[in-house]
Image (tube, grey):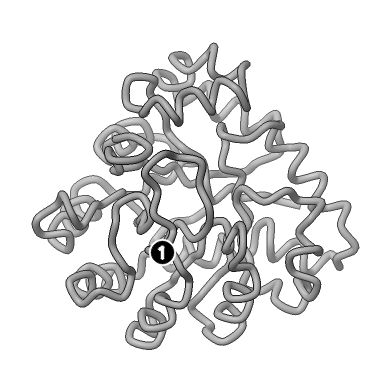
Amino acid sequence: MKVIDFHIHYIRREMLNATWLNYLEEINPAYHADIERFAEDPAALTDYLDSQGVESAVILPECAPATSGHVPTEEVIHYCRGQKRLFPFASINPNLHGDPASKLETYVKEGGVRGLKLHPSYQFFYPNEARLYPLYEKAQEFRIPVIFHIGSSIFKGTKLKYCDPIHLDDVAVDFPDLTILMAHSGRGFWYDACFFLSRLHENVYMDITGLPPKRLLDYFPELEKNADNVIFGSDWPTMPADIGKNIAAIRSLPLGETALEAILYKNASKVLMQAGVDP
């Protein structure tokens, strides 16, 4: 069974705020000691993905200097260039980028990005603010997915009120052809809301990044009914185990093969193909 990892962070030591760097050292000391090798050599990452049984991966930047750090989109574009298995996404901060829609267009046309990551609780905006609508219109035009961080965080300065998933209901209604992913699926206390929204809207997906695989059915008892709107992501390297262990744990859940294939590969493949990628 093929696997696509929809949530891998590109990291350079000097780009992370202290909270993230210290957390990374605590949760994944082996990677922390080897950051530079992975940051400089994409082959190191693809070799690792091979060892974990991962076919391809979405690589994420992060423009959130007030909370987590600033990993520029340009760095991710450069890292993924020429790598057929690594798909660069953009990170746009509506409080720092004056014309987010134009910025996204440039990233897509000149940098080849295949999606957008937004961090409402790190970047301090509500997803349904009118000023974001031109950005969503542009993403919808290019048929690229938008990932929203929806859930708790350990980073200092995070303001959870901004990532309440109810704000995505407006976006899903107003942009029915925009693919929306809820990263972390409401981690903490919004599990039911994320499950409901992904059942209500065909264009809304739960991204199970950062959730303990063995507890997925505790959080979402009817997960199998929603398998067509669930996408796997690892959050690597900010995770305590190898990606392969998480994949194995998901495969060990009492879910049918059709549901497992949808969660681990088919749904991500569909979303990426819409964005012009052959995963």
**Residue drawn where x is 86% and y is 65% of the image:** 255
Residue 195 position by quadrant: bottom right
Q: From where the camera sits, is residue 161 visible?
A: yes
Question: Residue 153, percent across and down?
Answer: 50, 47
**Residue drawn where x is 78% and y is 76% of the image:** 222
Q: Which amino acid type corresponds to the residue marked 1 in the rendered image?
A: Lys
Q: Is residue 62 left or right of residue 38?
A: left
**Residue drawn where x is 82% and y is 47% of the image:** 249
Foreground of the two, 117 or 113: 117
How busy is the neighbourhood of tag 1: few (under 14 within 10 Å), some, or many (20 plus)?
few
Numbered marks: total = 1
Foreground of the two, 184 or 81: 184
Secondary structure of residue under mark 1: helix
Residue marked by disc 1: 161
> Most extreme residue toward the top, as rendered?
33
Q: From where the camera sits, is residue 115 visible?
A: no
Foreground of the two, 263 or 240: 240
Foreground of the two, 214 or 34: 214
